[in-house]
Amino acid sequence: MSTCTHEWQMANVRFGLIAFEKCFHCGSVRTYFSSEDSLPLGDEYREGDHFWSRVETAQSFRFDLQCTRCGLIEGFGELMGLMHCTGCLEDCPVEQQRRVLERQRTWLVVAFGFLPQALTSPLPERKLAVLTEFFNQRRDTSRSTIKVVPFNLIPDLSRCAGEFLHDVGMLSQEPPAERKPLFS
Protein backbone atom coordinates (compact mmCIF):
# COMPACT_ATOMS: atom_id res chain seq x y z
CA MET A 1 0.00 0.00 0.00
CA SER A 2 1.33 3.41 -1.00
CA THR A 3 1.99 6.09 1.59
CA CYS A 4 2.14 8.76 -1.11
CA THR A 5 -0.26 11.68 -0.91
CA HIS A 6 -0.92 11.65 -4.61
CA GLU A 7 -0.86 14.80 -6.70
CA TRP A 8 -2.59 13.94 -9.95
CA GLN A 9 -2.06 15.32 -13.43
CA MET A 10 -3.52 14.20 -16.75
CA ALA A 11 -1.35 11.88 -18.81
CA ASN A 12 -1.76 10.00 -22.08
CA VAL A 13 -4.35 12.52 -23.32
CA ARG A 14 -6.04 11.51 -26.58
CA PHE A 15 -8.59 13.70 -28.41
CA GLY A 16 -11.43 12.39 -30.54
CA LEU A 17 -15.15 11.69 -30.65
CA ILE A 18 -17.55 9.57 -28.67
CA ALA A 19 -19.99 7.82 -31.01
CA PHE A 20 -23.46 6.79 -29.83
CA GLU A 21 -25.07 3.99 -31.83
CA LYS A 22 -28.57 2.60 -31.48
CA CYS A 23 -30.08 -0.62 -32.83
CA PHE A 24 -33.51 0.12 -34.25
CA HIS A 25 -34.38 -3.60 -33.97
CA CYS A 26 -33.92 -4.05 -30.20
CA GLY A 27 -33.35 -0.49 -28.93
CA SER A 28 -29.87 -1.24 -27.51
CA VAL A 29 -27.39 1.61 -27.23
CA ARG A 30 -23.62 1.35 -27.42
CA THR A 31 -20.82 3.87 -27.37
CA TYR A 32 -17.18 3.96 -28.37
CA PHE A 33 -14.28 6.37 -28.70
CA SER A 34 -12.77 7.22 -32.09
CA SER A 35 -9.68 9.29 -32.79
CA GLU A 36 -11.11 10.25 -36.21
CA ASP A 37 -11.86 13.93 -36.90
CA SER A 38 -15.45 13.28 -37.93
CA LEU A 39 -17.95 10.44 -37.87
CA PRO A 40 -21.01 10.87 -40.09
CA LEU A 41 -24.39 10.60 -38.37
CA GLY A 42 -26.80 8.06 -39.77
CA ASP A 43 -24.04 5.62 -40.73
CA GLU A 44 -25.88 2.26 -40.70
CA TYR A 45 -24.73 -1.35 -40.72
CA ARG A 46 -25.88 -4.77 -39.65
CA GLU A 47 -24.05 -6.91 -37.11
CA GLY A 48 -25.72 -10.25 -36.34
CA ASP A 49 -29.31 -9.53 -35.28
CA HIS A 50 -28.54 -5.82 -34.71
CA PHE A 51 -29.14 -2.93 -37.12
CA TRP A 52 -26.83 -0.20 -35.81
CA SER A 53 -27.14 3.46 -36.71
CA ARG A 54 -24.88 6.24 -35.46
CA VAL A 55 -27.27 8.71 -33.81
CA GLU A 56 -24.94 11.15 -32.04
CA THR A 57 -21.30 12.12 -31.69
CA ALA A 58 -19.63 14.33 -29.14
CA GLN A 59 -16.15 15.83 -28.99
CA SER A 60 -14.23 14.32 -26.13
CA PHE A 61 -10.87 13.16 -24.93
CA ARG A 62 -9.49 10.23 -22.99
CA PHE A 63 -6.86 10.40 -20.32
CA ASP A 64 -5.13 8.63 -17.48
CA LEU A 65 -4.04 10.27 -14.24
CA GLN A 66 -0.43 10.14 -13.10
CA CYS A 67 0.93 11.09 -9.70
CA THR A 68 3.67 13.71 -10.03
CA ARG A 69 5.22 12.53 -6.75
CA CYS A 70 5.48 8.74 -7.07
CA GLY A 71 4.74 8.20 -10.77
CA LEU A 72 1.72 5.92 -10.21
CA ILE A 73 -0.56 5.85 -13.27
CA GLU A 74 -4.26 5.30 -12.79
CA GLY A 75 -5.82 4.27 -16.10
CA PHE A 76 -9.26 5.53 -17.14
CA GLY A 77 -9.75 3.58 -20.37
CA GLU A 78 -13.28 2.69 -19.32
CA LEU A 79 -14.32 6.34 -18.71
CA MET A 80 -16.49 7.60 -21.57
CA GLY A 81 -17.21 11.00 -20.12
CA LEU A 82 -18.52 13.17 -17.34
CA MET A 83 -22.04 14.52 -17.08
CA HIS A 84 -23.65 17.44 -15.27
CA CYS A 85 -26.92 16.50 -13.55
CA THR A 86 -29.65 18.93 -14.66
CA GLY A 87 -32.18 17.83 -12.04
CA CYS A 88 -34.54 16.54 -14.72
CA LEU A 89 -35.99 13.64 -12.70
CA GLU A 90 -37.13 14.43 -9.15
CA ASP A 91 -37.12 10.75 -8.11
CA CYS A 92 -33.63 9.99 -9.47
CA PRO A 93 -31.09 9.05 -6.76
CA VAL A 94 -28.47 11.23 -8.51
CA GLU A 95 -30.78 14.27 -8.31
CA GLN A 96 -31.60 13.52 -4.67
CA GLN A 97 -27.89 13.27 -3.84
CA ARG A 98 -27.17 16.43 -5.87
CA ARG A 99 -29.68 18.44 -3.80
CA VAL A 100 -28.16 17.25 -0.50
CA LEU A 101 -24.59 17.93 -1.67
CA GLU A 102 -25.51 21.34 -3.07
CA ARG A 103 -26.43 22.51 0.45
CA GLN A 104 -22.87 21.53 1.44
CA ARG A 105 -21.42 23.48 -1.52
CA THR A 106 -20.42 20.25 -3.24
CA TRP A 107 -21.10 19.96 -6.96
CA LEU A 108 -21.95 16.54 -8.29
CA VAL A 109 -20.47 15.14 -11.51
CA VAL A 110 -21.60 11.81 -12.99
CA ALA A 111 -18.95 9.48 -14.45
CA PHE A 112 -20.08 7.44 -17.46
CA GLY A 113 -18.47 4.32 -18.79
CA PHE A 114 -18.80 2.98 -22.32
CA LEU A 115 -22.07 1.20 -23.06
CA PRO A 116 -23.06 -1.58 -22.86
CA GLN A 117 -20.04 -2.80 -20.82
CA ALA A 118 -20.50 -0.15 -18.13
CA LEU A 119 -24.01 -1.40 -17.37
CA THR A 120 -22.51 -4.49 -15.75
CA SER A 121 -19.04 -3.12 -14.89
CA PRO A 122 -19.32 0.51 -13.74
CA LEU A 123 -16.27 2.49 -12.67
CA PRO A 124 -15.09 1.15 -9.31
CA GLU A 125 -15.37 3.35 -6.21
CA ARG A 126 -11.56 3.58 -6.05
CA LYS A 127 -11.42 5.25 -9.47
CA LEU A 128 -14.33 7.57 -8.61
CA ALA A 129 -12.35 8.61 -5.52
CA VAL A 130 -9.24 9.31 -7.64
CA LEU A 131 -11.29 11.48 -10.03
CA THR A 132 -12.81 13.32 -7.07
CA GLU A 133 -9.31 13.92 -5.65
CA PHE A 134 -8.07 15.16 -9.01
CA PHE A 135 -10.89 17.68 -9.44
CA ASN A 136 -10.52 18.99 -5.87
CA GLN A 137 -6.72 19.12 -5.49
CA ARG A 138 -6.32 22.55 -7.11
CA ARG A 139 -9.62 24.05 -5.94
CA ASP A 140 -10.21 26.36 -3.02
CA THR A 141 -12.18 23.69 -1.17
CA SER A 142 -13.25 26.19 1.48
CA ARG A 143 -15.58 27.60 -1.19
CA SER A 144 -16.84 24.39 -2.85
CA THR A 145 -15.89 20.84 -3.74
CA ILE A 146 -16.71 18.31 -6.45
CA LYS A 147 -17.90 14.75 -5.96
CA VAL A 148 -17.84 12.18 -8.76
CA VAL A 149 -20.56 9.50 -8.68
CA PRO A 150 -21.28 6.56 -11.02
CA PHE A 151 -23.96 6.79 -13.71
CA ASN A 152 -25.51 3.46 -12.71
CA LEU A 153 -27.34 5.35 -9.94
CA ILE A 154 -29.62 6.72 -12.70
CA PRO A 155 -32.55 4.27 -12.82
CA ASP A 156 -33.76 5.09 -16.35
CA LEU A 157 -31.18 6.49 -18.78
CA SER A 158 -33.83 6.87 -21.48
CA ARG A 159 -35.49 9.65 -19.45
CA CYS A 160 -32.30 11.42 -18.31
CA ALA A 161 -31.64 14.87 -19.78
CA GLY A 162 -28.25 15.41 -18.14
CA GLU A 163 -25.57 17.24 -20.09
CA PHE A 164 -22.26 15.69 -21.00
CA LEU A 165 -19.33 17.99 -20.34
CA HIS A 166 -17.85 18.56 -23.79
CA ASP A 167 -17.31 21.44 -26.16
CA VAL A 168 -19.57 20.59 -29.09
CA GLY A 169 -21.12 23.79 -30.34
CA MET A 170 -18.80 26.07 -28.41
CA LEU A 171 -17.67 27.70 -31.65
CA SER A 172 -21.19 28.05 -33.01
CA GLN A 173 -22.98 31.40 -32.91
CA GLU A 174 -26.33 29.60 -32.93
CA PRO A 175 -28.03 28.96 -29.58
CA PRO A 176 -28.14 25.31 -28.51
CA ALA A 177 -31.18 23.28 -29.52
CA GLU A 178 -33.68 22.15 -26.93
CA ARG A 179 -32.21 19.55 -24.59
CA LYS A 180 -33.36 16.01 -25.32
CA PRO A 181 -33.00 12.82 -23.27
CA LEU A 182 -29.54 11.29 -23.58
CA PHE A 183 -30.41 7.96 -25.14
CA SER A 184 -33.78 8.48 -26.79
Image: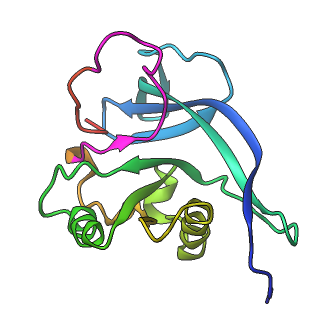
Rendered position, 3 above or below 159? below
Q: How is the image coloured?
A: rainbow
Q: Is residue 134 magenta?
A: no
**Residue 72 location (% of width, % of height):** 83, 69
Work out which quarter of the rendered image holds the N terminus and state it: bottom right
| Closer-to-camera residue (148/29) | 148
Choose top left, top right, bottom left or bottom right for residue 51.
Answer: top left
| Closer-to-camera residue (49/170) | 170
Q: Main secondary structure of the magenta part?
A: loop
Relative to 137, 158 lies left or right: left
Relative to 22, 58 lies left or right: right
Relative to 128, 149 lies left or right: left
Rendered position, 15 above or below 165? above
Residue at (30, 39) in percent of width and height:
182
Choose top left, top right, bottom left or bottom right for residue 60.
Answer: top right
Residue at (20, 68) in percent of width and height:
96
**Residue 78 location (% of width, % of height):** 61, 54
Work out which quarter of the rendered image holds the C terminus and state it: top left
Residue at (20, 62) in percent of width and height:
92
Choose top left, top right, bottom left or bottom right for residue 9.
Answer: bottom right
Q: How many marks?
A: 0
**Residue 75 location (% of width, % of height):** 72, 59
Rendered position, 111 above or below 102? above
Residue at (55, 17) in percent of width and height:
39
Relative to 4, 100 lies left or right: left
Q: Pick out the residue farthest to the left.
A: 90
**Residue 146 location (% of width, % of height):** 45, 63
Q: Is residue 171 magenta?
A: yes
Q: Pick out the residue farthest to the top.
A: 173
Q: Which residues are magenta?
A: 160-176
